[in-house]
Image: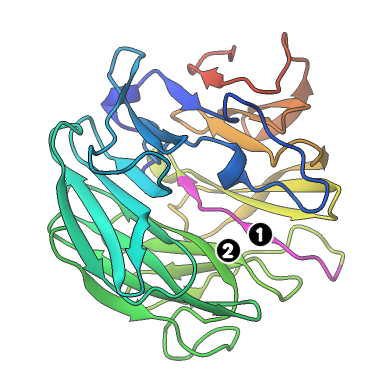
Amino acid sequence: MRYMTRKILSILLLCLLFALAGCAVNSAALPSPAQTAAYPDKYNNCYIQDGRIYLADGSGGWNDVTPANIPPGDTINSALFINGNDGWVIDYSLKNLHGFTFFRTTDGGKNWDVSFVKISLNSGGVEMDFIDSNNGWILASQDASMGCLYVSVLRTTDGGVTWEVVSVTGGSDYDSTAGCLPSFGIKNGISFIDVNNGWVTGESHYDDLIYVYVTHDGGVTWQSQNIPLPDTSTGMNYETNLPMFFSAGYGILPVRTSDGTNLTMYFYSTTDSGMTWVLSSTIDGISLSVCYPQYCFSSDGQRGYMTNGVSLYAMKNDAWSKITPSASLTGVQIIYVGGEAGW
Protein backbone atom coordinates (compact mmCIF):
# COMPACT_ATOMS: atom_id res chain seq x y z
CA MET A 1 0.00 0.00 0.00
CA ARG A 2 1.77 3.11 -1.19
CA TYR A 3 0.03 6.13 0.26
CA MET A 4 0.57 9.57 -1.23
CA THR A 5 3.32 8.72 -3.69
CA ARG A 6 1.62 9.39 -7.01
CA LYS A 7 2.63 12.29 -9.28
CA ILE A 8 -0.91 13.60 -9.49
CA LEU A 9 -0.62 14.99 -5.97
CA SER A 10 3.11 15.19 -5.46
CA ILE A 11 2.77 18.49 -3.60
CA LEU A 12 -0.89 18.45 -2.58
CA LEU A 13 -2.26 16.30 0.21
CA LEU A 14 -5.96 16.77 0.64
CA CYS A 15 -7.68 15.60 3.77
CA LEU A 16 -11.39 16.40 3.75
CA LEU A 17 -12.00 15.96 7.43
CA PHE A 18 -15.64 16.92 7.53
CA ALA A 19 -18.50 17.23 5.10
CA LEU A 20 -19.23 20.85 4.27
CA ALA A 21 -22.33 20.80 6.41
CA GLY A 22 -20.26 19.89 9.44
CA CYS A 23 -20.58 16.93 11.79
CA ALA A 24 -23.81 16.23 13.53
CA VAL A 25 -23.71 15.51 17.26
CA ASN A 26 -25.20 12.17 18.25
CA SER A 27 -25.62 11.89 22.01
CA ALA A 28 -26.90 8.32 21.87
CA ALA A 29 -23.85 6.79 20.20
CA LEU A 30 -20.44 7.68 18.89
CA PRO A 31 -20.68 9.46 15.53
CA SER A 32 -19.80 7.37 12.50
CA PRO A 33 -16.94 8.74 10.37
CA ALA A 34 -18.54 7.27 7.25
CA GLN A 35 -21.61 9.46 7.84
CA THR A 36 -19.86 12.68 8.72
CA ALA A 37 -16.65 12.88 6.75
CA ALA A 38 -15.52 12.80 3.16
CA TYR A 39 -12.34 10.83 2.66
CA PRO A 40 -9.74 10.98 -0.07
CA ASP A 41 -8.66 7.62 -1.43
CA LYS A 42 -5.37 5.89 -0.57
CA TYR A 43 -3.53 7.85 -3.25
CA ASN A 44 -5.21 11.10 -2.20
CA ASN A 45 -6.46 12.00 -5.65
CA CYS A 46 -10.17 11.23 -5.31
CA TYR A 47 -12.84 11.39 -2.65
CA ILE A 48 -16.53 10.62 -2.13
CA GLN A 49 -18.95 13.24 -0.89
CA ASP A 50 -22.75 13.23 -0.96
CA GLY A 51 -22.83 10.24 -3.26
CA ARG A 52 -20.54 11.80 -5.85
CA ILE A 53 -16.96 10.92 -6.82
CA TYR A 54 -14.41 13.70 -7.33
CA LEU A 55 -11.03 13.21 -9.03
CA ALA A 56 -8.10 15.65 -8.84
CA ASP A 57 -7.37 17.38 -12.13
CA GLY A 58 -3.67 17.80 -11.40
CA SER A 59 -3.95 21.58 -11.03
CA GLY A 60 -5.57 21.85 -7.62
CA GLY A 61 -9.14 21.38 -8.87
CA TRP A 62 -11.60 18.50 -8.71
CA ASN A 63 -13.83 16.95 -11.37
CA ASP A 64 -17.04 15.01 -10.77
CA VAL A 65 -16.36 11.65 -12.44
CA THR A 66 -19.32 9.71 -11.03
CA PRO A 67 -20.52 7.06 -13.51
CA ALA A 68 -23.64 8.32 -15.28
CA ASN A 69 -25.62 5.19 -14.40
CA ILE A 70 -25.19 5.65 -10.65
CA PRO A 71 -28.45 7.29 -9.52
CA PRO A 72 -28.30 10.34 -7.22
CA GLY A 73 -28.41 9.36 -3.57
CA ASP A 74 -26.82 5.96 -4.03
CA THR A 75 -24.38 4.72 -1.40
CA ILE A 76 -21.00 4.54 -3.08
CA ASN A 77 -19.16 2.08 -0.90
CA SER A 78 -15.66 2.57 -2.27
CA ALA A 79 -13.82 4.56 -4.93
CA LEU A 80 -10.13 4.37 -5.77
CA PHE A 81 -7.90 5.95 -8.41
CA ILE A 82 -4.23 4.95 -8.57
CA ASN A 83 -3.45 7.74 -11.06
CA GLY A 84 -5.31 10.15 -13.30
CA ASN A 85 -6.67 7.36 -15.51
CA ASP A 86 -7.18 4.04 -13.73
CA GLY A 87 -10.00 3.91 -11.21
CA TRP A 88 -12.63 1.62 -9.70
CA VAL A 89 -15.95 2.17 -7.95
CA ILE A 90 -18.22 -0.07 -5.89
CA ASP A 91 -21.84 1.11 -5.61
CA TYR A 92 -23.24 -0.67 -2.58
CA SER A 93 -26.78 0.45 -3.42
CA LEU A 94 -26.55 -1.66 -6.59
CA LYS A 95 -26.24 -4.96 -4.75
CA ASN A 96 -28.40 -7.93 -3.88
CA LEU A 97 -27.93 -11.26 -2.13
CA HIS A 98 -25.91 -12.52 -5.09
CA GLY A 99 -23.32 -9.77 -5.52
CA PHE A 100 -22.66 -6.11 -6.30
CA THR A 101 -22.09 -3.75 -9.25
CA PHE A 102 -18.49 -2.87 -10.06
CA PHE A 103 -17.25 0.02 -12.24
CA ARG A 104 -13.86 0.38 -13.92
CA THR A 105 -12.34 3.25 -15.92
CA THR A 106 -9.04 3.62 -17.75
CA ASP A 107 -9.55 7.20 -18.98
CA GLY A 108 -10.07 9.19 -15.80
CA GLY A 109 -13.79 8.59 -15.52
CA LYS A 110 -14.83 9.67 -18.99
CA ASN A 111 -16.03 6.14 -19.70
CA TRP A 112 -16.83 3.30 -17.31
CA ASP A 113 -17.05 -0.44 -17.84
CA VAL A 114 -19.74 -2.04 -15.68
CA SER A 115 -19.74 -5.60 -14.37
CA PHE A 116 -21.43 -7.62 -11.65
CA VAL A 117 -19.27 -9.41 -9.10
CA LYS A 118 -21.01 -12.59 -7.96
CA ILE A 119 -20.58 -13.21 -4.23
CA SER A 120 -23.11 -13.95 -1.50
CA LEU A 121 -23.91 -10.77 0.44
CA ASN A 122 -26.24 -10.96 3.41
CA SER A 123 -24.69 -8.31 5.64
CA GLY A 124 -22.00 -5.65 5.78
CA GLY A 125 -20.10 -3.70 3.16
CA VAL A 126 -17.52 -4.20 0.42
CA GLU A 127 -14.02 -2.70 0.59
CA MET A 128 -11.29 -2.80 -2.05
CA ASP A 129 -7.65 -2.00 -2.68
CA PHE A 130 -5.46 -1.83 -5.80
CA ILE A 131 -1.68 -1.48 -5.98
CA ASP A 132 -1.46 -1.02 -9.78
CA SER A 133 -3.66 -1.19 -12.86
CA ASN A 134 -3.90 -4.99 -12.67
CA ASN A 135 -3.64 -6.25 -9.09
CA GLY A 136 -6.48 -5.63 -6.67
CA TRP A 137 -8.40 -7.16 -3.78
CA ILE A 138 -11.93 -6.98 -2.39
CA LEU A 139 -13.02 -7.68 1.19
CA ALA A 140 -16.68 -8.68 0.95
CA SER A 141 -18.66 -8.86 4.20
CA GLN A 142 -21.17 -11.66 3.86
CA ASP A 143 -22.82 -12.30 7.21
CA ALA A 144 -22.61 -11.18 10.84
CA SER A 145 -23.52 -12.52 14.27
CA MET A 146 -22.56 -11.76 17.88
CA GLY A 147 -19.37 -9.80 17.26
CA CYS A 148 -18.42 -11.89 14.22
CA LEU A 149 -18.19 -10.84 10.59
CA TYR A 150 -17.88 -13.50 7.90
CA VAL A 151 -15.98 -12.30 4.84
CA SER A 152 -14.42 -13.45 1.59
CA VAL A 153 -11.25 -12.07 0.06
CA LEU A 154 -11.37 -11.75 -3.74
CA ARG A 155 -8.41 -11.04 -6.00
CA THR A 156 -8.04 -9.79 -9.56
CA THR A 157 -4.93 -9.75 -11.75
CA ASP A 158 -6.58 -8.15 -14.77
CA GLY A 159 -7.74 -4.84 -13.35
CA GLY A 160 -11.12 -6.06 -12.15
CA VAL A 161 -12.34 -7.79 -15.30
CA THR A 162 -12.44 -11.11 -13.45
CA TRP A 163 -12.30 -11.97 -9.75
CA GLU A 164 -11.31 -15.09 -7.83
CA VAL A 165 -12.16 -15.91 -4.21
CA VAL A 166 -8.78 -16.66 -2.59
CA SER A 167 -9.81 -16.86 1.08
CA VAL A 168 -12.88 -17.13 3.29
CA THR A 169 -13.31 -16.78 7.05
CA GLY A 170 -12.68 -19.81 9.19
CA GLY A 171 -14.02 -20.60 12.64
CA SER A 172 -14.52 -18.25 15.56
CA ASP A 173 -11.14 -18.99 17.14
CA TYR A 174 -8.77 -16.16 18.01
CA ASP A 175 -6.38 -17.26 15.28
CA SER A 176 -7.48 -19.82 12.71
CA THR A 177 -5.07 -22.72 12.38
CA ALA A 178 -6.22 -23.11 8.78
CA GLY A 179 -4.63 -19.78 7.82
CA CYS A 180 -7.99 -18.08 7.34
CA LEU A 181 -9.27 -14.79 8.65
CA PRO A 182 -11.24 -15.66 11.79
CA SER A 183 -14.95 -14.97 11.85
CA PHE A 184 -14.69 -13.07 15.12
CA GLY A 185 -14.14 -9.34 14.92
CA ILE A 186 -15.62 -6.56 12.79
CA LYS A 187 -13.30 -6.05 9.84
CA ASN A 188 -13.09 -2.48 8.54
CA GLY A 189 -10.82 -2.69 5.51
CA ILE A 190 -8.12 -4.36 3.43
CA SER A 191 -4.85 -2.89 2.19
CA PHE A 192 -1.80 -4.16 0.31
CA ILE A 193 1.71 -2.78 -0.08
CA ASP A 194 2.67 -5.15 -2.95
CA VAL A 195 1.35 -8.32 -4.62
CA ASN A 196 2.18 -10.46 -1.59
CA ASN A 197 1.87 -8.42 1.60
CA GLY A 198 -1.41 -7.03 2.87
CA TRP A 199 -3.44 -6.32 6.00
CA VAL A 200 -6.99 -6.56 7.30
CA THR A 201 -7.83 -4.45 10.36
CA GLY A 202 -10.83 -3.97 12.60
CA GLU A 203 -12.16 -4.36 16.12
CA SER A 204 -12.99 -7.41 18.21
CA HIS A 205 -15.21 -8.04 21.21
CA TYR A 206 -12.14 -9.34 23.04
CA ASP A 207 -10.33 -6.83 25.25
CA ASP A 208 -6.57 -6.24 25.17
CA LEU A 209 -6.17 -7.16 21.52
CA ILE A 210 -4.84 -5.15 18.58
CA TYR A 211 -6.85 -6.52 15.64
CA VAL A 212 -4.43 -6.83 12.72
CA TYR A 213 -4.19 -9.78 10.33
CA VAL A 214 -1.44 -10.01 7.73
CA THR A 215 -0.90 -12.05 4.56
CA HIS A 216 2.36 -12.74 2.76
CA ASP A 217 0.94 -14.70 -0.18
CA GLY A 218 -1.47 -12.27 -1.81
CA GLY A 219 -4.43 -12.92 0.48
CA VAL A 220 -4.57 -16.72 0.39
CA THR A 221 -3.52 -17.28 4.00
CA TRP A 222 -3.72 -14.93 6.98
CA GLN A 223 -2.29 -14.83 10.48
CA SER A 224 -2.63 -12.50 13.45
CA GLN A 225 0.17 -9.95 13.61
CA ASN A 226 1.62 -9.46 17.05
CA ILE A 227 1.28 -5.76 17.90
CA PRO A 228 2.37 -4.73 21.42
CA LEU A 229 -0.46 -3.30 23.53
CA PRO A 230 -0.18 0.48 23.98
CA ASP A 231 -1.47 0.49 27.56
CA THR A 232 -0.57 -1.63 30.58
CA SER A 233 -4.17 -1.38 31.80
CA THR A 234 -6.38 -4.40 31.23
CA GLY A 235 -9.90 -4.56 29.87
CA MET A 236 -9.27 -2.11 27.03
CA ASN A 237 -11.03 -2.49 23.68
CA TYR A 238 -9.08 -1.29 20.65
CA GLU A 239 -10.06 -0.48 17.07
CA THR A 240 -7.35 -0.57 14.43
CA ASN A 241 -7.46 1.41 11.19
CA LEU A 242 -5.63 0.48 7.99
CA PRO A 243 -1.88 1.12 7.93
CA MET A 244 -0.50 3.90 5.75
CA PHE A 245 2.82 3.41 3.98
CA PHE A 246 5.23 6.01 2.71
CA SER A 247 8.72 5.84 1.24
CA ALA A 248 11.68 3.70 2.34
CA GLY A 249 9.53 1.21 4.22
CA TYR A 250 8.13 3.77 6.65
CA GLY A 251 4.50 3.39 7.70
CA ILE A 252 1.94 4.49 10.31
CA LEU A 253 -0.70 2.30 11.96
CA PRO A 254 -3.50 4.18 13.78
CA VAL A 255 -5.20 2.51 16.77
CA ARG A 256 -7.85 4.02 19.02
CA THR A 257 -9.77 3.28 22.18
CA SER A 258 -12.64 5.16 23.82
CA ASP A 259 -14.57 5.41 27.06
CA GLY A 260 -17.62 6.71 25.19
CA THR A 261 -16.86 10.37 25.88
CA ASN A 262 -13.18 10.77 25.08
CA LEU A 263 -10.89 8.91 22.77
CA THR A 264 -7.21 8.05 22.83
CA MET A 265 -5.28 7.77 19.56
CA TYR A 266 -2.18 5.59 19.34
CA PHE A 267 0.10 5.82 16.32
CA TYR A 268 2.44 2.92 15.66
CA SER A 269 5.26 3.18 13.15
CA THR A 270 7.31 0.77 11.05
CA THR A 271 10.58 1.10 9.17
CA ASP A 272 10.49 -2.37 7.60
CA SER A 273 7.30 -2.15 5.48
CA GLY A 274 5.00 -3.41 8.22
CA MET A 275 6.89 -6.49 9.33
CA THR A 276 7.22 -5.02 12.85
CA TRP A 277 5.47 -2.11 14.57
CA VAL A 278 6.40 0.05 17.58
CA LEU A 279 4.28 2.61 19.44
CA SER A 280 5.58 6.04 18.43
CA SER A 281 3.05 8.56 19.78
CA THR A 282 -0.12 8.86 21.89
CA ILE A 283 -2.81 11.55 22.11
CA ASP A 284 -5.13 11.37 25.14
CA GLY A 285 -8.41 13.06 25.99
CA ILE A 286 -9.77 13.70 22.50
CA SER A 287 -13.40 14.78 22.87
CA LEU A 288 -15.99 12.91 20.81
CA SER A 289 -18.61 15.65 21.17
CA VAL A 290 -18.43 16.52 17.46
CA CYS A 291 -16.69 13.89 15.33
CA TYR A 292 -14.22 11.08 15.35
CA PRO A 293 -10.74 12.54 14.80
CA GLN A 294 -9.49 12.46 11.22
CA TYR A 295 -5.93 12.93 10.06
CA CYS A 296 -3.71 13.49 7.05
CA PHE A 297 0.03 13.18 6.49
CA SER A 298 2.70 14.53 4.19
CA SER A 299 4.12 12.36 1.42
CA ASP A 300 6.98 11.18 3.64
CA GLY A 301 4.79 10.60 6.71
CA GLN A 302 6.87 12.96 8.86
CA ARG A 303 4.24 15.70 9.17
CA GLY A 304 0.52 15.58 9.71
CA TYR A 305 -2.62 17.14 11.07
CA MET A 306 -5.53 15.76 13.04
CA THR A 307 -8.77 17.29 14.28
CA ASN A 308 -12.04 16.22 15.90
CA GLY A 309 -13.81 19.43 14.91
CA VAL A 310 -12.95 21.02 18.27
CA SER A 311 -9.17 20.78 18.66
CA LEU A 312 -6.37 20.77 16.11
CA TYR A 313 -3.17 18.71 16.46
CA ALA A 314 0.00 18.83 14.41
CA MET A 315 2.64 16.11 14.04
CA LYS A 316 6.32 16.45 13.25
CA ASN A 317 8.70 13.49 13.33
CA ASP A 318 6.23 11.23 15.21
CA ALA A 319 5.52 13.84 17.92
CA TRP A 320 2.00 15.33 18.19
CA SER A 321 1.20 18.70 19.77
CA LYS A 322 -2.01 20.66 20.18
CA ILE A 323 -2.04 23.90 18.23
CA THR A 324 -4.40 26.86 17.96
CA PRO A 325 -6.33 27.05 14.68
CA SER A 326 -6.78 30.44 13.04
CA ALA A 327 -10.47 29.81 12.33
CA SER A 328 -13.36 27.63 13.42
CA LEU A 329 -12.83 23.94 12.69
CA THR A 330 -16.46 22.92 12.39
CA GLY A 331 -17.71 22.40 8.85
CA VAL A 332 -14.46 23.20 7.07
CA GLN A 333 -12.03 21.43 4.83
CA ILE A 334 -8.43 21.05 5.92
CA ILE A 335 -5.85 21.00 3.16
CA TYR A 336 -2.21 20.19 3.84
CA VAL A 337 0.29 21.08 1.12
CA GLY A 338 3.42 19.58 2.65
CA GLY A 339 5.05 22.61 4.22
CA GLU A 340 4.87 24.01 7.73
CA ALA A 341 1.37 25.42 7.41
CA GLY A 342 -2.00 23.82 6.77
CA TRP A 343 -5.39 25.08 5.75
Q: Is residue 324 left or right of residue 127?
A: right
Q: Quadrant of the C terminus?
A: top right
Measuring 40% from the left and 58% from the top, which residue is drawn there? 127
Query: In this rendering, is residue 333 above or below 239?
Result: above
Main secondary structure of the magenta stretch:
loop
Residue lying at the far top in this picture: please name it: 326
Q: Is residue 72 left or right of residue 17?
A: left
Are the two marked residues, 2 and 1, in contact with CB atoms closer than 8 angstroms? yes
Which three-letter amino acid code belongs to the residue tagged 2?
Gly
Residue 217: tell me if it is visible. Answer: no
Tag count: 2
Measuring 81% from the left and 65% from the top, which residue is drawn there? 236
Measuring 68% from the left and 38% from the top, which residue is drawn there? 293
Q: Choose between 79 and 123: the one closer to the eye.
A: 123
Q: Dot 2, crowdedness within 10 Å: few (<14), some or many (≥20)?
A: many
- Across and down, in percent, residue 6 comes to 30, 31
SS category of the residue bearing label 2: strand
Separation of disc 2 and disc 1 at Cα? 6 Å
Q: Choose between 238 and 272: the one closer to the eye.
A: 238
Check residue 130 in the rendering and tell me which mark sits there, or answer none: none
Q: Is residue 168 left or right of residue 298?
A: left
Residue underneath mark 2:
202
Q: Dot 1, crowdedness within 10 Å: few (<14), some or many (≥20)?
A: many
Residue underneath mark 1:
239
- Across and down, in percent, residue 297 comes to 53, 31
Residues drawn in magenta: 234-244
Name the N-terminal-most of marks 2 and 1: 2
SS category of the residue bearing label 1: strand
Query: In this rendering, is residue 241 above or below 55?
Result: below
